[in-house]
């Protein structure tokens, strides 16, 4: 295909991506270096019979005018990145000096909004991803052993948690674990503690969010592994059986090696998707005990006074996080590609 | 006579089937529970006293005099105008799917047929774009959109969803096009077709399965989206998912959680129907990138 034809075929798609994915990143960078204008203040001396007083009032008209003229706000350098709501260098420094041991320091660190969100996002990503891979493989092996007529309906049901909108899926679980919902009430009954609430304790909230994440993503890895299992040659499995391999050994030494590239694929997708976790936090209304990076951006953008600069700074930090997360996988892909190309 | 190996495999089969059954209960249980509960009153669905109340609808009998009640649905659809958001969702989803597929088939075809190194780099770039959390992009859009006065309208959200969809669409269609032999379009071109005619008259007719599969995933992305539609649409133009999210605040206060439950069930049903009819395509789509790549 000549370059010219290639260009005309690809340009609509490429233009859409550049306009709405690449340029917004530039817009995010610009916004992150600016901060909203402060209110315009007028000071005047108010003199009365008992002497003069200095009065400061907000000039509403001028403030609105200034904000309308320069919607971006004023240039603030890296202030957005270093202030208390983001990397909080000053507060971290103080916490480091003021803490006797590492435990207290971490506790103080987790009170800062950005680190709190980062801690949950990373925990969620790195707990959900391996669980999803193992559970998905287990389900795939189980379903593969089912008689043929049962496979179709099983796959149908298994797909549901993944297909259903994350906001809806997490709401459904949230209603069930509510103190008065079926799971919440059963747990209270089991532990004989009517005050026990999954929502009140941070540890339990984290656990519930992670359980939701596994429930939501396990079908994806199940389907990928299940399709992979169909490609494992029957001859090899039979040869292994004749050589005396038991079921476990067949899985360990024949099936699992075939699944290796699939594990990399699932890991890549899961790392990307879990790192952006947002909906369950909105559904569970869990901001008191668990927030995520996406959630703090969402909150900055949808609050009454929209904090574009602050949201943009968190966005940049999130993008950097994604890049760090994916660099090893991308590097590997690139190496494989250049190896096959030569 | 059974030998030990066979006996062990029987017990293994029981364990493995039991595990699958357990998984099926975990996977489907919450949906069935909520579907059933949406026809009950709040006192039954959130029944602290006895969970079987939700099954038998004890309070529902007392409050409405009937075993089932559609009060939740009435509240959501009639009192809170859920129907409008359903129309908005339909507009957004259908337009997003059509535009994404048009752009994606053209681009995916070009990527599959060109042997140039830069097509690999475009695919890598698409992967990087795919990794961007949607909300970070939204924080880039909001300010310019406010300035240009295009915030809040459906077309804006549609274009944004199309763009966010492109990386995935390109990857998937690219791998489907790779499966179609090159000889087909080349022989058409030998016979005097231009590249576009070969693409349109020869390749697209055999590409329908791939296009439908990719379309399904575009549908799911647009339908399930929360980050983009919740922050880019005004109150009047809200689609279903942001509407449900805003229900949560208001209904919780009014004590009408069942409205939200009914809305959730209404939004979930189309997805069930979709999976029922297109299960095979969804499965093949999920694995398109993995098994072949």
Image: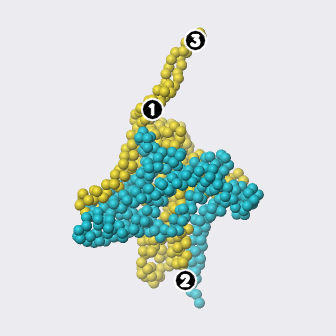
- Of tags 3 and 1, the one toward the viewer is 1
- The residue at which mark 1 appears reads as A67
Q: Residue at x 25, y 64 (%)?
A: B194
Name the image quarter holding the N terminus of chain A.
Answer: bottom left
Q: Are marks 1 and 2 on the same chain?
A: no
The tint of chain B in the picture is cyan
The circle drawn on residue A48 is 3
Q: Earlier in the sequence, mark 3 or mark 1?
A: 3
Residues under labels 2 and 3: Cα distance?
104 Å
- Of tags 1 and 2, the one toward the viewer is 1
**Considering the numbered disc 3 on the image, is that residue within a helix, a strand or a loop?**
strand
Residue A151 in picture, x, y percent from top left: 53, 74
The chain letter for the residue carrying disc 1 is A
**Quick one: which chain is yellow?**
A
Q: Relative to the observer, which residue lies in front, B196 or B168?
A: B196
Q: Residue at x 43, y 41 (%)?
A: B149
- The residue at which mark 2 appears reads as B5
The chain letter for the residue carrying disc 2 is B
């Amino acid at each position: 295909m000549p370059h010219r034809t290639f260009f005309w075929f690809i340009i609509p798609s490429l233009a859409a991506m550049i306009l709405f994915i690449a340029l917004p990143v530039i817009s995010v960078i610009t916004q992150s270096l600016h901060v909203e204008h402060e209110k315009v203040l007028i000071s005047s001396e108010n003199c009365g019979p008992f002497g003069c007083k200095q009065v400061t009032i907000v000039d509403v008209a001028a403030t609105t005018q200034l904000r309308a003229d320069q919607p971006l706000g004023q240039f603030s350098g890296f202030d957005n990145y270093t202030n208390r709501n983001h990397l909080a260098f000053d507060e971290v420094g103080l916490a480091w000096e003021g803490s006797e041991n590492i435990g207290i320091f971490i506790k103080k660190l987790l009170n800062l909004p950005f680190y709190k969100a980062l801690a949950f996002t990373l925990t969620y990503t790195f707990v959900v991803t391996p669980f999803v891979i193992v559970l998905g493989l287990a389900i795939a092996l189980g379903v593969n052993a089912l008689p043929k007529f049962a496979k179709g309906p099983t796959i149908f049901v298994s797909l549901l948690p993944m297909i259903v909108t994350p906001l809806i899926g997490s709401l459904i679980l949230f209603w069930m674990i509510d103190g008065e919902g079926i799971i919440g009430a059963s747990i209270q009954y089991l532990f004989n503690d009517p005050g026990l609430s999954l929502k009140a304790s941070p540890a339990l909230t984290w656990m519930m969010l992670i359980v939701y994440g596994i429930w939501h993503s396990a079908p994806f890895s199940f389907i990928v592994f299940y399709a992979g299992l169909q490609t494992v040659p029957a001859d090899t499995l039979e040869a292994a059986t004749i050589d005396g391999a038991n079921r476990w050994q067949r899985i360990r030494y024949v099936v699992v090696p075939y699944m290796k590239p699939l594990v990399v694929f699932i890991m890549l997708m899961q790392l990307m998707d879990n790192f952006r976790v947002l909906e369950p936090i909105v559904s569970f209304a869990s901001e008191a005990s668990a927030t995520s990076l996406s959630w703090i951006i969402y909150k900055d953008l949808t609050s009454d006074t929209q904090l574009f600069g602050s949201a943009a700074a968190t966005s940049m930090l999130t993008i950097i996080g994604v890049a760090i997360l994916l660099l090893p996988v991308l590097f590997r892909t690139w190496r494989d590609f250049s190896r096959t190309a030569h | 006579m059974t030998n030990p190996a066979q006996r062990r495999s029987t017990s293994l089969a029981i364990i493995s089937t039991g595990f699958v059954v357990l998984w099926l209960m975990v996977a489907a249980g919450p949906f069935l529970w909520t579907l059933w509960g949406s026809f009950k009153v709040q006192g039954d669905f959130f029944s602290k006293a006895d969970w079987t109340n939700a099954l038998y609808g004890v309070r529902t009998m007392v409050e409405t005099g009937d075993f089932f009640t559609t009060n939740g649905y009435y509240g959501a659809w009639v009192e809170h105008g859920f129907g409008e958001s359903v129309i908005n969702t339909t507009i957004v989803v259908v337009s997003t799917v059509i535009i994404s597929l048009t752009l994606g088939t053209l681009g995916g075809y070009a990527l599959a047929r060109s042997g140039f190194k830069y097509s690999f780099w475009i695919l890598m770039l698409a992967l990087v774009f795919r990794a961007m959390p949607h909300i970070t992009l939204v924080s880039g859009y909001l300010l310019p959109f406010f300035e240009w006065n295009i915030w809040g309208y459906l077309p804006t959200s549609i274009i944004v969803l199309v763009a966010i969809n492109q990386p995935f669409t390109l990857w998937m269609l690219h791998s489907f096009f790779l499966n179609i032999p090159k000889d087909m379009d080349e022989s058409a071109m030998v016979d005097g077709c231009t590249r576009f005619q070969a693409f349109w008259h020869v390749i697209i007719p055999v590409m329908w399965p791939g296009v439908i599969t990719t379309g399904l995933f575009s549908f799911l992305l647009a339908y399930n989206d929360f980050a983009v539609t919740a922050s880019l649409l005004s109150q009047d133009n809200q689609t279903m998912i942001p509407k449900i999210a805003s229900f949560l605040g208001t209904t919780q206060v009014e004590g009408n959680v069942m409205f939200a439950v009914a809305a959730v069930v209404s939004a979930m049903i189309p997805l069930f129907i979709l999976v029922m009819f297109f299960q095979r395509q969804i499965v093949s789509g999920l694995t398109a990138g993995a098994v072949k790549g």
